[in-house]
């Protein structure tokens, strides 16, 4: 079977009634049940091995709280097993337009994780946005909390001027997290 590989033959040591051998499995796109067969003379014995496909384990973002309009470090999806040949696509969605994610992220063949970028926009108050990853009939979620921007500082330069003069005063207004 393509999902399991066994040695062509094994040797049972003298005086023993059994031996062990390694079975190598490949990543599969769906549950596979290869049959492993041993033959000695005219006698044949078979056993079935269940090879599970990768499942979605989690989706996470970092940090989990950020001022709306800033860019988080990013997100990561994790599978239970390495992705099969050709990789897999994990669908992504958000519960609010204030957080944008790609519609999907590709987990490369042989890997268990893939990273994705996301962007945020300003919000009028603290907003919890759910990010959903879907693959193989299951979904996982995480929450990114967006905070409202607020005044952090206001400075003017110069700080003293003569009344009635035509002096230019420059002001600088800064929001938190920007």
Image (cartoon, rainbow, N blue to C red):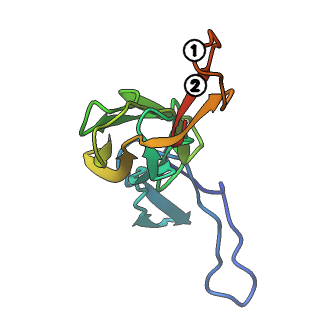
Q: CA distance from mark 2 to mark 1?
A: 19 Å
Mark 2 or 1, closer to the camera: 1
Q: Is residue 7 above or below residue 47?
A: above
Instruction: Using the image, tell me which numbered label, if any, was put on residue 171.
Output: 2
Q: Is residue 20 left or right of residue 174?
A: right
The mark tally for this picture is 2
Provide the secondary structure element on which disc 1 rests. loop
- Residue at image position (50%, 53%) is 81
- Residue at image position (69%, 27%) is 158
Which residue sits furthest right?
A: 14
Which residue is under mark 1? 164
Quadrant showing the C terminus = top right
Residue 92 placement (x, y as % from top left): 34, 36
- The image quadrant that residue 171 belongs to is top right
Q: Name the one closer to the observer, 155 or 28.
A: 155
Label 2–label 1 contact, CB within 8 A: no
- Residue at image position (45%, 53%) is 64
Provide the secondary structure element on which disc 2 rests. strand
Residue 59 placement (x, y as % from top left): 42, 50
Q: Name the one closer to the observer, 12 or 106.
A: 106
Which residue sits furthest top?
A: 166
Q: Is residue 138 left or right of residue 78?
A: left
Q: Is residue 22 left or right of residue 136?
A: right
Q: Is residue 10 above or below residue 110?
A: below
Residue 61 placement (x, y as % from top left): 47, 48
């Amino acid at each position: 079977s393509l999902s399991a590989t066994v040695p062509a033959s094994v040797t049972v040591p003298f005086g023993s009634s059994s031996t062990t051998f390694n079975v190598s499995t490949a990543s599969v796109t769906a549950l596979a049940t290869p049959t492993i067969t041993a033959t000695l003379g005219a006698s044949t014995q078979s056993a079935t091995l269940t090879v599970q496909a990768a499942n979605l384990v989690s989706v996470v973002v970092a940090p989990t709280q950020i001022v709306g309009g800033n860019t988080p470090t990013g997100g990561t999806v994790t599978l239970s097993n390495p992705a099969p040949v050709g990789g897999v696509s994990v669908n992504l969605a958000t519960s609010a337009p204030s957080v944008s994610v790609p519609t999907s992220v590709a987990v490369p063949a042989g890997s268990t994780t893939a990273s994705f970028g996301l962007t945020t926009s300003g919000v009028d108050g603290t907003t919890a946005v759910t990010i959903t990853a879907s693959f193989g009939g299951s979904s996982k979620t995480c929450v990114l909390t967006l905070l409202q921007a607020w005044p952090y500082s206001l400075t003017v330069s110069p700080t003293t001027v003569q009344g009635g003069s035509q002096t230019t005063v420059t002001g600088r207004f800064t929001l938190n997290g920007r």
